[in-house]
Image: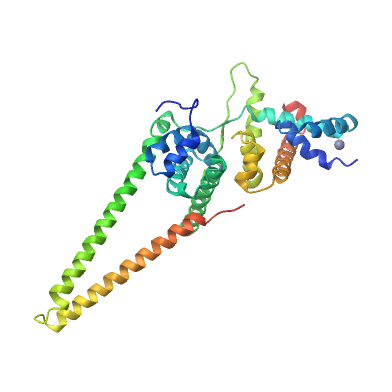
Amino acid sequence: MPEKEIGWDEKGCIEQLQKGNKDALAPLVEFYRKRAYNIALGFVRNPEDALEMSQLAFIKVYRSIRHFDGQRAFFPWFYQILRNTCFNFLQKKKKLKEESLEEADSSGSESLFTISRTPEEDFRIGEQRRLLAEAIQQLKPKEREILLMQHFHQMSYSEIAESLGIPIGTVMSRLYQARSALREYLERHYPSGLKHVM
Amino acid sequence: MSCDPFKLSMMAKIDGELGRDEEAALQAHLAACSPCREELASHQRIKEMTSFLRLRQPEDRDWEQYWSRIHNRLERNLAWIFVSAGAVLLAGFLTFWLLEQFVLSAAVPWALRLGGTLLIAGLLLLFVSVWRERWSLRKTDRYEGIIR
Ligand SMILES: [Zn+2]
């Protein structure tokens, strides 16, 4: 399937989908699949489940597109579907784990990031990135979510506000909490000071 | 002056979402408040640092199969709709046939007629029960877990 970044018509696709044209789903998937995967990864924390959940969210889009108000932005609506899909999955997984009395599996603590550095970069840089990744992963879920939305999913404040159903003021204060928690974590683990880390 | 209102402006500043008036107010405060200047700088450094992190990505093969997996699942759903529609038709016909052959036929012994009636009633009950369960599952699946 060709990349359809340029000249792709989201509104037209959605209208076609609402008329029952299944083929109109393909360009929508093509355009949003990477973002969808990244968002799902933030919740389920492993690539296989993130692929699966993002695909399931697109299927849910197809099934419930009739309920979508074409006047609204698509992406925040999609974000909510994807988020609920991931939450349902995590809830079921948790229940299964409790039922099978399995030992806590490691998937919940799997790394969200690949840590790399170029040969020219100082070895300490790899260590700093690893620490930052760790800091992001230990954030409270709500703080981690909003940080990922802003830093990694390139969502604007208004997109975040609409996706989470919160006012923009809350978006900013939650971001402030998240970033302050990150800063604190880094300072605690790098007592020599932040300037040294970065 | 309290620093608190400027903490939020700092976030908007870092993310390029600050309006012109707020920008002026923030700059005026920063000029007079060195703790806020330092705080802004450290938030900015953290944001810059995170831009070097990469989220884990799946294999290229997974992207190649991405659409076909969605497409296949949608097709399979269509197949299931056909299968269930066919099953309902067959069940209806079978019920009719049983009614005609056994229940309403005076030539058939009463035990067989009673058996036929019970069988039809049982199948109907089962069908309604399964259908109701699926329907409520569908509903909860759509609305459960909307956590804000
Ligand atoms: Zn201040």
Q: Residue furthest top?
A: A120
Display coloring: rainbow
Total number of numbered discs in the rendering: 0
Q: Nearer the viewer, residue B38 or A71?
A: A71
- Tell me which residue sits at (77%, 27%) in the image: A195
Can residue A163 be seen here?
A: yes
Q: Position of residue A59 (x, y in %)?
A: 42, 45
Can residue A192 be seen here?
A: no
- Tell me which residue sits at (44%, 31%) in the image: B59
User: Is residue B124 shown above or below A84?
Assistant: below
- Tell me which residue sits at (51%, 50%) in the image: A90
Q: Nearer the viewer, residue B74 or A64?
A: A64
User: Is residue A1 shown above or below B70?
Assistant: above
Query: For ligand 1, which image quadrant applies?
Result: top right
Q: Quadrant of the C terminus of chain A?
A: top right
Q: Determine whether, in the image, residue B43 is placed left or right of residue A7.
A: right
Q: Residue furthest left?
A: B107
User: Is residue B94 shown above or below A156?
Assistant: below
Q: Quadrant of the N terminus of chain A?
A: top left
Q: Determine whether, in the image, residue A88 is placed left or right of residue B53.
A: left
User: Is residue B91 shown above or below A4?
Assistant: below
Q: Determine whether, in the image, residue B144 is placed left or right of residue B86.
A: right
Q: Determine whether, in the image, residue B12 is placed left or right of residue A64.
A: right
Q: Position of residue B2 (x, y in %)?
A: 88, 42
Q: Nearer the viewer, residue A89 or B80?
A: B80
- Tell me which residue sits at (33%, 44%) in the image: B75
Q: Position of residue B24 (x, y in %)?
A: 83, 31
The quadrant holding residue B33 is top right
